[in-house]
């Protein structure tokens, strides 16, 4: 039921309403019915003209108006304001404003006081916190306050025009926030696009089927020339990797049929220097209302580093298996090499032992032979035969020496050797060992370093290698003997069993038959030969191997069947200069009269030696071991020379005996004789300083010369 229908006509406001809605409205009725007698306005029938006029004005207005009357600001308002006041209406009618809007009492107090003094107040979008729906709420309003005068002219009330602008303010706030977010996003995009990663931005016009792009895009594809600002696809294709062109075309075409219209493809772009760099092209189609593609804007991003890293990783995984296999092979090879070394070591020990005994046998034969030669000088028929026998002994001696060399137990006499000079000295001699069908070339690098080796052993080794090459060449060929310096950063890495350092490399290379694996595996073994009976003893490479190892070097053999063989010897560099070769003839043999003490456990060798020394005119004493030799020394203080075997039974060792004999009171010279020399007079395979050694089997001449020299050196 509408209030109007219950309103009595006499309570309408004003009494005559004409056609003004406000004068017949709800508030008109309420105001008429309200008992104003207890308020600042007083009973309604006593209202002044001005008050009546103001209330009529207020009721007639379609905008929310409220009047605050008197100092308490008693509220009287129109229909529009009633709508604004929501839940507080009609409670507000006739209430002092501070009570009606208690949450903003201070604000209204100021309004009433200001306007009652005659001033006006205006606020636009004034923010106030009101209690609405049971909780505080921010609202915004346009507020205009002006004084209303009484009949006598002084301000008695305040007319307020109230417009709530909350909806507009909130919309503005939302718009501002959206604008700010847009601006920020725009800035971030700009930053991203200007970073080094972005190679350029572009747009593909789906209608004209042409590209346009920013400055960087133009530069990347070198599109500056020609004065155009749009380009067909083919023009860009020129800057792409040929393998990628079709893929890019396909991706752009494919994007049309995708729901999201996305295009994304990895491609390679040619740089000005000619190499290619990886980039990612991506974009999204824009369609018109009819669903027709209009344009495809996109961006080109540099992904080169990432792509390379990915590729590397991929390759790494793919080759993993291969690398594992390689590592396993390398390990197997290393183990094989180790087994070879062990095998050669074992054979070496055996060979060394055999050679020692063999030498002793030869020594007996040789010594006795020479004595027989002396005794039978008048029997030319016997002399010839004896000569044959002594040749055989010499051959046997060489054999034993080679075996010892392999066992790395031959005494070495190292000296500083200039390899360039050594090779040039040997050249003619080597040439003579070769038939005319084989050409020997020598090549010595400039400034090759010196070596510290046993010169005659090195010559021997090179001769052995050249002869092996000769035998491997069937019908004519070439042998190259070369000498170079070799700096090994890591010898082990190059497959050589050497520490890093400076080396001299002497290599003999031939274009002969080469070796199959089965031969190569055994070539260093003593007595291993593929040559016909009587043609090779199989000791050549064994000796080379032993000698080079004993000289702190290593042998490296490269061979291929049907192509040839190269055997390289590496020796450590020596920083000293070569000594001038000792000139003149060495003093020969016997002066006689001096006393020589022979110590030898083998009775036959001992006897033969005693005989030879006696022949040379020395007074000879003998002992079968070091203990009895010491006793002999003590009873015969005038012993001038101790001639002792190196290896003997007994409690005193040969080098201890030698020390006693050479020290006061005896002061004897010392000569060692041995076919098999152990560490006691060696250090690292070399003779100690001042130690004289006579290798078994020795000849009469060698014995004479060595004894004489030792005695002379003592003086
Ligand atoms: N340059 C080479 N080319 C081909 N095969 C070789 C070469 N050098 C060595 N050999 C092979 O290695 C084997 C052993 O060589 P090594 O020098 O130890 O003995 P040998 O030459 O047979 O006999 P020796 O050297 O004692 O007279 C040879 O029999 C041969 O089969
Ligand atoms: Mg040989």
Image (cartoon, rainbow, N blue to C red):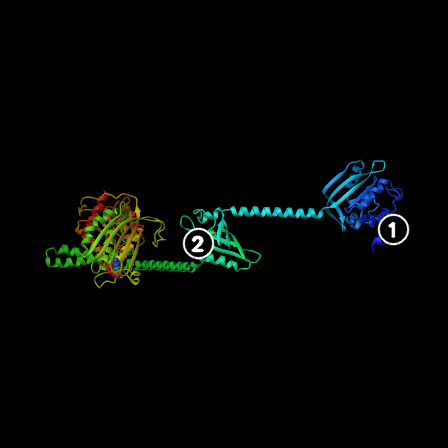
Q: Which of the 4 image quadrants contains residue 378?
A: bottom left
* Residue 351 in picture, x, y percent from top left: 28, 59
Taking depth in this image into account, of 413 and 53 the one nearest to the observer is 53
Q: CA distance from mark 1 to mark 2?
A: 90 Å
Residue at the bottom extreme of this rendering: 533
What is the secondary structure assignment of the residue under circle 2? helix
Q: Is residue 703 above or below residue 71?
A: below
Of the 4 image quadrants, the one containing the C terminus is top left
Query: What is the crowding at mark 1: few (fewer than 14 residues within 10 Å), some, or many (at least 20)?
Result: some
Can the viewer see residue 301 in this picture? Answer: no
Q: Earlier in the sequence, mark 1 or mark 2?
A: 1
Q: Is residue 588 above or below residue 349?
A: above
Residue matched to label 2 = 234
* Residue 7 in picture, x, y percent from top left: 86, 52
Residue matched to label 1 = 9
Give the number of marks. Answer: 2
Taking depth in this image into account, of 230 and 93 the one nearest to the observer is 230
Residue 472 is labelled as none
What is the secondary structure assignment of the residue under circle 1? helix
Q: Where is ligand 2, by quadrant?
A: bottom left
């Amino acid at each position: 039921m509408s209030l109007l229908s219950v309103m009595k006509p006499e309570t309408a406001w004003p009494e005559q309403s004409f056609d003004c809605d406000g004068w017949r409205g709800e508030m008109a009725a309420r105001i008429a019915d309200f008992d104003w007698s207890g308020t600042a306005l007083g009973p309604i029938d006593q209202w002044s003209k001005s008050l009546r006029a103001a209330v009529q004005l207020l009721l007639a207005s379609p905008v929310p108006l409220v009047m605050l009357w008197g100092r308490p600001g008693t509220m009287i308002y129109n229909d529009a304001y009633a709508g604004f006041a929501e839940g507080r209406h009609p409670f507000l009618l006739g209430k002092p404003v501070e009570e009606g809007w208690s949450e903003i009492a201070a604000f209204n107090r100021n309004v009433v006081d200001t306007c009652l003094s005659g001033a006006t107040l205006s606020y636009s979008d004034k923010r106030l916190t009101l209690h609405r729906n049971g909780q505080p709420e921010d609202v915004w309003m346009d507020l205009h306050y002006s004084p209303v005068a009484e009949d006598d002219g002084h301000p008695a009330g305040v007319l307020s025009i109230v417009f709530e602008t909350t909806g507009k303010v909130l919309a503005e706030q939302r718009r501002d926030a959206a604008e700010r977010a847009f601006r920020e996003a725009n800035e971030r995009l700009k930053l991203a696009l200007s970073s080094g990663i972005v190679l350029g931005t572009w747009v593909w016009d789906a209608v004209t089927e042409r590209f346009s792009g920013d400055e960087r895009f133009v530069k990347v594809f070198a599109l500056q020339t020609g004065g155009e600002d749009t380009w067909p696809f083919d023009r860009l294709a020129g800057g792409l990797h040929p393998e990628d062109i079709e893929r890019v075309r396909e991706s752009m075409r494919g994007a049309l049929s995708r729901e999201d219209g996305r295009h994304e493809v990895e491609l390679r772009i040619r740089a000005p220097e000619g190499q290619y760099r990886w980039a990612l092209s991506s974009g999204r189609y824009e369609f018109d209302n009819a669903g027709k593609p209009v344009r495809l804007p996109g961006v080109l991003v540099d992904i080169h580093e990432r792509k390379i890293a990915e590729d590397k990783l991929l390759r790494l995984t793919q080759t993993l298996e291969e690398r594992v296999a390689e590592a396993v092979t390398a390990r197997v090879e290393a183990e094989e090499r180790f087994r070879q070394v062990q095998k050669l070591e074992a054979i070496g020990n055996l060979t060394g032992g055999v050679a020692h005994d063999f030498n002793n046998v030869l020594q007996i034969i040789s010594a006795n032979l020479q004595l027989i030669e002396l005794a039978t000088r008048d029997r030319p028929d016997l002399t010839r035969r004896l000569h044959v026998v002594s040749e055989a002994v010499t051959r046997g001696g060489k054999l034993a020496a080679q075996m010892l060399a392999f066992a790395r137990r031959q005494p070495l006499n190292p000296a500083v050797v200039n390899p360039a000079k050594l090779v040039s000295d040997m050249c003619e001699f080597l040439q003579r060992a070769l038939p005319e069908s084989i050409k020997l070339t020598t090549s010595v690098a400039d400034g090759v370093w010196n070596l510290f080796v046993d010169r005659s052993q090195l010559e021997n080794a090179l001769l052995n290698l050249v002869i092996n090459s000769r035998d491997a060449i069937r019908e004519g060929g070439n042998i190259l003997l070369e000498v170079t310096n070799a700096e090994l950063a890591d010898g082990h890495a190059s497959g050589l069993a050497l520490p890093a350092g400076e080396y001299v490399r002497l290599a003999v290379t031939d274009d002969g038959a080469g070796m199959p694996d089965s031969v190569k595996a055994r070539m260093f073994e003593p007595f291993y030969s593929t040559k016909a009976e009587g043609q090779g003893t199989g000791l050549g490479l064994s000796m080379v191997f032993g000698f080079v190892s004993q000289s702190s070097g290593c042998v490296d053999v490269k061979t291929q069947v049907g192509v040839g063989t190269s055997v390289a010897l590496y020796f450590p560099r020596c920083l000293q200069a070569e000594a001038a070769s000792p000139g003149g003839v060495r003093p020969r043999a016997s002066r006689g009269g001096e006393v020589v003490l022979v110590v030898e456990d083998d009775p036959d060798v001992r006897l033969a030696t005693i005989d030879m020394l006696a022949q040379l005119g020395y007074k000879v004493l003998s002992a079968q071991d070091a203990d009895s030799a010491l006793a002999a020394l003590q009873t015969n203080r005038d012993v001038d020379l101790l001639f002792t075997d190196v290896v003997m039974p007994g409690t005193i060792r040969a080098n201890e005996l030698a020390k006693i004999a050479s020290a006061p009171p005896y002061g004897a010279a010392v000569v060692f004789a041995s076919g098999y020399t152990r560490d006691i007079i060696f250090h690292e395979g070399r003779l100690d300083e001042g130690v004289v050694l006579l290798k078994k089997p020795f000849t009469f001449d060698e014995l004479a010369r060595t004894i004489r020299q030792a005695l002379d050196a003592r003086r």
